[in-house]
């Protein structure tokens, strides 16, 4: 028996075909999406159509997709505008207004598990109500990207899961229900929301007779794909940077730094998200005229601390901390340290300092790291792998490169095929262990201190 997992991310659709009994990858394919912060859902369908021959070999399928995106539909089920994606920050003023209007940060954290920022669906609804009132008035239903694709595959109704629903801003992870008064306050009128399916449920059947599992958000899918256990903290370096862990209790952080999401299994997934991650490396590579492999070599040729250079990597604004209008800052530049090597090293250190901050925020919510896992495209950087243990202050585990979001949803499809909500016992994938070199700890502590000073000094810029 074969199962397919689909990862519809910001940049592309990836599909993996696996054996249901052990998760062994049989085949995989990918197709690109248009770049940007909004995208018409038809582009996701076209990318998925390119994988149709592979999908039709599967006995069960599931979709994971980028969280938070707003797919607004009219009465006929057509999109009223291109979907606003998680990385679209235009709704930052609306996020602040909603927090103030509906009880403040503490109330939001207690009710929804999170204090919404511009990424969250609820803030995008308010933005549309204020800036595109005709589109808002036409909106009869709102889906997330994975919900829309699940329906396109053949789900019997609009359906979502608790993991992705927890990123809307109008669903309560602690209570397991929608909060319609928040949804209505955001858009200005009532609208239909997808049913929240249970873990392991079958929600429909494809045209070729495969079972359809509920699907989930991308981070929840990756947690399944990595086989996370309590105490595992994942640092994912993709378009966004995330630090997350599985937990048995919901989180409610009134500071807004930790999002108290649910996961796809019935547990919870406290998560910190940064807007800038792998693009820190690609931007630095462009600055020094290098490709990513050369950037890594340059960074490793520099001394720890980059000769005194410190990069604050808020290149496209930032989500954690919540600075949607921020820009990047390169501090400490002199004629003696202005080298390609130091700029490359400063970029790697900045990326890892940002993630180390994220781990600290999780710890403040009661997460005690047992081990740290590096994943995502950025984990392929030799410099990131080498520098991470010192900056993070702990050894790191790097699982073999794989499409873990898609693998997680393949695992969910296997559960639907087996008719159980229990995790199918797939073996862990091979991984490498990395430790800090002797003497790196002191240098890393100085790097973290300089980074923290720059971060705090620019808070009011």
Image (cartoon, rainbow, N blue to C red):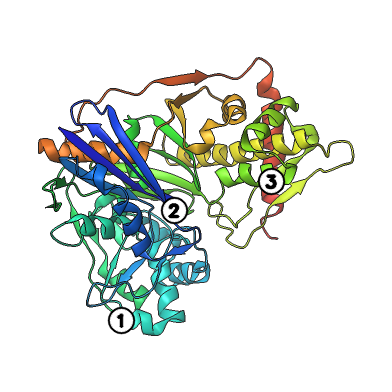
Q: Residues within 10 Å of mark 2 (few under 14, many from 20)?
A: many
Residue at the spot of label 1: 138
- Residue at the spot 50% in from the left edge and 58% down from the top edge: 35
Q: Of label 2 and label 3, which has the lower sequence position?
A: 2
What secondary structure is found at the residue carrying circle 2?
loop
Q: Residues within 10 Å of mark 1 (few under 14, many from 20)?
A: some
Residue 441, x across and y down, in percent: 65, 22
What secondary structure is found at the residue carrying circle 3?
helix
Q: Residues within 10 Å of mark 3 (few under 14, many from 20)?
A: few
What secondary structure is found at the residue carrying circle 1?
helix
Q: Quadrant of the C terminus?
A: bottom right
Q: Marks 2 and 3, how far apart in space?
A: 21 Å
For this orientation, the residue located farthest to the top is 438
Q: Of label 1 and label 3, which has the lower sequence position?
A: 1
Residue at the spot of label 2: 10
Disc marking residue 286: 3
**Residue 399 vertical position relative to residue 123 in the rendered view, above or below:** above
Left or right, 68 with reference to 433: left
């Amino acid at each position: 028996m074969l199962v397919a997992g689909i990862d519809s991310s910001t940049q592309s659709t990836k599909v993996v075909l696996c054996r249901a009994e052990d998760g062994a990858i049989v085949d995989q394919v990918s197709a690109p999406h248009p770049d940007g912060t909004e995208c018409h859902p038809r582009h996701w369908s076209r990318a998925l159509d390119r994988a149709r021959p592979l999908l039709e070999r599967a006995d069960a399928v599931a979709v994971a997709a980028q969280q938070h995106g707003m797919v607004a539909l009219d009465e006929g089920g057509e999109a009223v505008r291109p979907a606003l994606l998680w990385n679209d920050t235009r709704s930052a003023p609306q996020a602040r207004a909603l927090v103030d209007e509906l009880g403040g940060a503490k109330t939001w954290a207690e009710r929804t598990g999170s204090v919404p920022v511009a990424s969250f669906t609820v803030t995008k609804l308010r933005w549309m109500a204020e800036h595109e009132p005709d589109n808002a008035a036409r909106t009869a239903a709102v889906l997330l990207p994975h919900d829309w694709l699940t329906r396109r595959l053949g789900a019997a109704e609009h359906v979502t899961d608790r993991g992705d629903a927890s990123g809307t801003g109008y669903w309560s992870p602690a209570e397991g229900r929608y909060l319609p008064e928040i949804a209505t306050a955001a858009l200005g009128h009532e609208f239909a929301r997808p049913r929240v399916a249970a873990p392991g449920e079958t929600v429909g059947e494809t045209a070729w007779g495969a079972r359809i599992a509920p699907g989930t958000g991308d981070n929840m899918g990756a947690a399944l794909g990595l086989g996370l256990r309590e105490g595992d903290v994942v640092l994912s370096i993709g378009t966004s940077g995330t630090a997350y862990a599985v937990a048995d209790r919901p989180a409610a952080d009134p500071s807004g730094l930790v999002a108290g999401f649910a996961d796809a299994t019935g547990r919870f997934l406290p998560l910190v998200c940064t807007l800038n991650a792998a693009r820190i490396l690609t931007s630095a590579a462009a600055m020094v005229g290098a490709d990513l492999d050369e950037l890594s070599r340059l960074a490793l040729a520099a001394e720890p601390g980059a000769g005194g250079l410190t990069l604050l990597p808020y290149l496209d604004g930032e989500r954690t901390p919540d600075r949607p209008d921020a820009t990047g800052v390169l501090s400490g530049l002199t004629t003696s340290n202005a080298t390609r090597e130091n700029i490359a090293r400063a970029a790697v250190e900045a990326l890892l300092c940002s993630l180390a901050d994220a781990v600290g925020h999780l710890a403040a919510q009661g997460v005690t790291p047992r081990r740290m896992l590096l994943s995502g495209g950025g984990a392929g950087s030799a410099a990131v792998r080498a520098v991470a243990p010192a900056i993070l202050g702990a050894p790191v585990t790097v699982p073999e490169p794989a499409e873990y979001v898609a693998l997680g949803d393949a695992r969910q499809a296997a559960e639907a095929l087996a008719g159980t909500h229990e995790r199918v016992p797939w073996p862990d994938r091979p991984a490498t262990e990395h430790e800090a070199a002797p003497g790196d700890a002191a240098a890393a502590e100085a790097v973290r201190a300089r980074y923290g000073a720059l971060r705090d000094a620019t808070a009011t810029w």
